[in-house]
Amino acid sequence: MSAYYDLQGQRQRRELWFQTARDQINQMLNPDGTPVIPQFDSPHRETLWLAAALYTGGPEHVDIINRALARWHDLPPVPNDEKAPGHRETHGTEFGIFQSNTITHLYHRFADKMTPAAKAVAQVHLQNATRTFDGSGQPDTKFHGANDNMPAMATQGLIFGGECLGNADAVKQGRLYLNQIRLLLSRSAWMSEFNSSTYTAVTLSHIAQIATFARDAEIRALALDIEHRLWAEVLLHFHPPTFRQAGPHSRANAANFSGHSHCLQLVLWAALGATISGRDPIRSMYQPDGHEIIHFEGCPWQSIAEWTHFLDTDFHLPVALAELATKRAYPTHTRGRSESMGAYGLSSNVYHTETYMEEDFSLGSVNIPMGGGEQTTSLFATYKLKPLTVDFRDAATVFCKYNITGDTHGQMDRSADGQYQGERAINNKGWFFTLQKDNVGLLLVTPNLSVAPLETGALRLDVVFPAHYGNIRRTLIGSGPARDGAVGESADVVPVSIEAGEVFINIIPLIPTSLPRPAALRFESQHGRYEVLQLINYEGPRRVFSRAQLELALNGVIFTIDAKKNHASLEEFHRAKSKALITDYYFQNNRFFEFQRDHVWFQATYAPDCGGVQTEAVGGRTVARPVFETSELDATKLPFVSGPVAPNFPFFPWKDNMEVKWYPENSWIIGSRGLPAETPYTRLVERIKVK
């Protein structure tokens, strides 16, 4: 793959973005380099993210960023508080995965434009970025099944910092990390932090920067192959008619759940343009419509800065992959494997994702969540709001979150400078298990047991319909009549059908356990931004639930989405999809579940307390778990998917110390044999701490 899509257009869009940021620099930085708002002060990241636009501008812009960088170490520390942005780095001299690696990138790119004072600051961070303790080379920045974006930044910092300093070991460690990605993608379809509108974009942009700017030709070539695989991940999950990332997301925030513009959508605009991507990020950030969710509590300048750093590269999008953004043979199926450091409170797991698309909608799922599932879109749908869609505002999403606080969706938080408000992200607090067959998804739910004992007045599963650009048209609950809007409730556990845009959606609630509750389900409009179907386990006075009690708070849904044009009416759709045979019981710490309806048959047996799975079957057969399978292209032609796999080269950069500054209590044992320079080629180092 050597022909890249629209590089000239991409460079024009990048320069348009940079020029627009320069034109509005007085909203972010003063001429002397001091910040207009506190988010742009040391050690926070925003000024550093913005720097590429200024270093590529006129002398006055270069002067501003040099002044800002020169004062980076002169400011007092920020409070060492979890609520403080960049809370790990409390001072501008400290290593920070964002600040040190971004400064290293800037020095690698723009050292010839830096003043001596700015260079002096940058050189501190070159040293930070190349250290194996409290630096980019520390053991928790390697690719190990979580937070891929951080080791991607560390990889860039090691390579670029090593190249600037002549530190061959740092460059070698960066190559080691690139090969870790190669090996991960030889075993899996996706990165561990897959399909995230935030973190996939971080990884993709930093790999693209390595492919563009690294001085070593072999490093650039390996980074290019990795970038091609990342583009395959992104575009196989892009649903062209809704201009949304379909399928499950490993990590999402409020903007991502609702499908609004964030980092990955900016990258898609840069690579594909406004018409194909359905996005105009300049309009979104500089002329907000009051409906779109703006990240960073509504402060657009922080996103503008972050996105500037992402665009400081060419994106090497192969033409053959770019066609996925417009050409699809519906219906499409994509399935893939990835690796997880942990789920359900336990370590070491494997993700299996599935994404199904038709012209009017998509449905995706992942069998287990990342971590506790706080940001995972385990069951996620996109759909068209109108027959002809021209941008993302003509479409919408549906997702599920387990709610243990009673908080409503669409509450606002104020930005750090106090000038803006943005939607608060409510984390999912449920452990989700899924199965999927085409346009039908099974979601089995238990509250996140790690929060026990829990004092609360609410336990419920929220099926959430963002209403920023369109509302539910009609709803039908049980045997009742169809009603306009998202209205109604039921004391009984009954099926619900919904007309929204160009689709019908049928939701069959599973159990849910009554603990007790005044209603089993109800619709509620929240803050004029969301319509929520609440499937209630408990609602009443605050009480304490033990872990054993929460384990019995079972919930879940059978979720079916289909194009309206396939059915005579909402009523006909409701009758057809609500006829089902369901067996659902809990016995000896396992949930036994079976669902049968027309062409869909799910069987599942799993342990809610740990996520252990005994049975996961569709159509009576154990679910196929392919490593990488898609109807949209020959995956074996992508880098690393087929052919022999070469091992990583022998190199252990941490020598006899794997201590991480942030986790000094962690235990480790190092055993090795045969590494270069070892005498007598065997070693065992122990450091075991018992908590």
Image (cartoon, grey):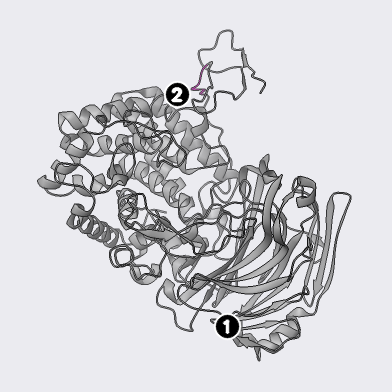
Residue 653 inside the magenta-drawn segment = yes
Give me the residue at 45% from left, 75% from top.
Answer: 469
Count of number-bearing discs: 2
Observer-nearest of 383 and 36:
36
Give me the residue at 45% from left, 42% from top.
Answer: 83
Amino acid identity at mark 1: Gly
- The numbered dot on residue 180 is none
Q: Is residue 158 above or below residue 489?
A: above
Q: Residues within 10 Å of mark 2 (few under 14, many from 20)?
A: many
Image quarter hosting the C terminus: top right
Residues tagged 2 and 1 counted as in contact (Cβ below 8 A): no
Residue under label 1, please give it.
Answer: 485
| Image x and y of residue 280, in percent | 33, 67
- Residue extending farthest left: 59
For the stretch drawn in magenta, the main secondary structure is loop
Q: Earlier in the sequence, mark 2 or mark 1?
A: 2
Give me the residue at 31% from left, 34% from top.
Answer: 104
Write the start and end of the magenta stretch as one range: 651-655
Where is residue 212, by image quadrant? top left
Amino acid identity at mark 2: Thr
| Image x and y of residue 426, in percent | 54, 56
Observer-nearest of 379 and 665:
665
Residue under label 2, please give it.
Answer: 132
Image quarter hosting the N terminus: bottom left
**SS class, disc 2:** loop
Residue 232 inside the magenta-drawn segment = no
Q: Residues within 10 Å of mark 1 (few under 14, many from 20)?
A: some
Asked whether, in this view, residue 2 is left or right of residue 459, the answer is left
**SS class, disc 1:** loop
| Image x and y of residue 384, in percent | 51, 77
Asked whether, in this view, residue 353 is left or right of residue 40, the answer is right
